[in-house]
Image (tube, grey):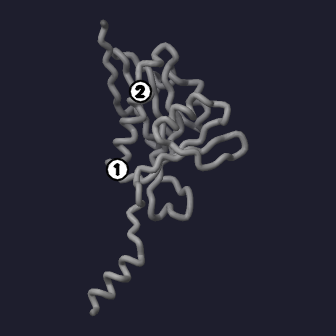
Amino acid sequence: MESHKTVIKSADSENLLDLELCAKEFLDFIDNFKEKFLKGKFYVLTAYYDSILAGVLVADKKIRQIDALEKIIPNIYLYLIYVNKKFRNNQIGKKLLDSFINIQKQNGIGSIYIELPQKFKKGINFLQKRSFQRINKIQNNIILELKLWNDYGIIDSQVIEEDFNNMLS
């Protein structure tokens, strides 16, 4: 049985041509991708399968403001995970996503969001199998979230009050 090696790396400006060759039709959906990528506004992971670029993950580098908790919970927006058709069913998408999640956990990110067209059933199923939850639907798009913090770091205020009153008595 032949052994294949997948390597996940962060992309930099030198990888732009490779990124466009691998996933141009999907990168074109991201407004001003080339310009923003060259300015370092995206977090991009690449997956090399036997030294060939086979997959790409693109996320926003800035923390997104999603809801009233954004000041408490740092969120990041995931634009896309793309694996070239020739390399699918080799766990490349899973490895890209797992690497991204681990990096975000290390960076203290509380939630990862992604918005996908409702008709993109394979992508939605892929993410839901990896614990992303559907949280909203806007027009024909589904918004999914992966919570990396279970309790948001919030302690029940009643417990604090009881402890505080015990400290005073």
Residue type for callout 1: Asn
Name the quarter where the C terminus is drawn.
bottom left
Q: Residue 156: give x, y in percent of width and height.
A: 41, 72
Name the quarter where the N terminus is drawn.
top left
Nearer the observer, 47 or 157: 157
The numbered dot on residue 67 is none
Q: Residue at x 34, y 16 (%)?
A: 51
Read off the residue under disc 2: 15
Q: Residue at x 31, y 18 (%)?
A: 5
Quadrant in which residue 72 is drawn: bottom left
Quadrant in which residue 53 is drawn: top left
- Precedes in sequence: disc 1 or disc 2: 2
Tell me the SS state at disc 2.
helix
Q: Residue 89: give x, y in percent of width and height.
A: 46, 18
- Alpha-carbon neighbours of circle 2 within 10 Å: few (<14), some, or many (≥20)? some
| Residue that lies at the very extreme toward the right in this rendered image | 139
Read off the residue under disc 1: 107
Q: Residue at x 51, y 27 (%)?
A: 82
Residue type for callout 2: Asn
Compared to 142, does 75 lie above or below?
Answer: below
Please count the marks in the image. Answer: 2
Q: Residue 71: give x, y in percent of width and height.
A: 47, 64
| Residue that lies at the very extreme toward the bottom in this rendered image | 169
Compared to 157, does 118 lie above or below?
Answer: above
Q: CA distance from mark 1 to mark 2?
A: 24 Å
Tell me the SS state at disc 1.
loop
Q: Nearer the viewer, mark 1 or mark 2?
A: 1
Quadrant in which residue 29 is drawn: top right
